[in-house]
Image (tube, grey):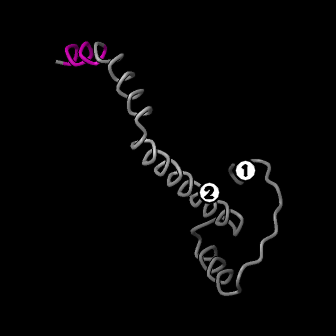
Amino acid sequence: MSIESKGKKATFLLSSRLLDEVKAIVREGSFRSINAFVEQALSELVQRVQREERRQAFAEASGDPLFLADLKSVGGAFEAADEESLTALR
């Protein structure tokens, strides 16, 4: 959700040092507001956490024989289409 869209208020307790650093960054013009800074920071952290969760899920799945068999089956189903595409690209 961007700052332009309707937001929802939230209250957070931050250390004085961190808040001062954020304010200084905003004053330098890198962000329109403290809200914009916090929204971007939280958005990036959420994306990082979600990426790590997916990475862990794939790592676990890579050791699951049923998942690997299914992956092989699906890959085989597209083998002819892949060959056709490669031929068309040559």
Question: On the rendered structure, is 3 left or right of 55?
Answer: right
Q: Position of residue 39 (x, y in %)?
A: 67, 60
**Which residue is denoted by mark 1 in the rendering?**
4
Question: On the rendered structure, is 3 left or right of 88?
Answer: right
Give the farthest residue toward the front: 65
Secondary structure at numbered mark 1: loop
**Which residue is denoted by mark 2 in the rendering?**
43
Crowd around label 2: few <14 · some 14–19 · many ≥20 (10 Å)? some
Residue 17 covered by magenta stretch: no
Question: On the rendered structure, is 61 left or right of 4?
Answer: left
Q: Toward the viewer: 68 or 42?
A: 68
Tag 2–tag 1 contact (CB < 8 Å): no
Question: On the rendered structure, is 51 left or right of 10?
Answer: left
Residue at horizontal 50%, vertical 46%? 57
Of the numbered discs 2 and 1, the one sitting upstream in the chain is: 1
Residue at horizontal 39%, vertical 42%? 62
Give the farthest residue toward the bottom: 17
Residue at horizontal 42%, vertical 48%? 59
The magenta span reads 81-89
Residue at horizontal 64%, vertical 77%? 22
Dividing the picture into quarters, in which one does residue 33 lie?
A: bottom right
- Amino acid type of the residue that numbered disc 1 sits on in the rendered structure: Glu
- Amino acid type of the residue that numbered disc 2 sits on in the rendered structure: Ser
**Relative height, residue 78 to residue 16 (above, below):** above
**Relative height, residue 55 to residue 23 (above, below):** above
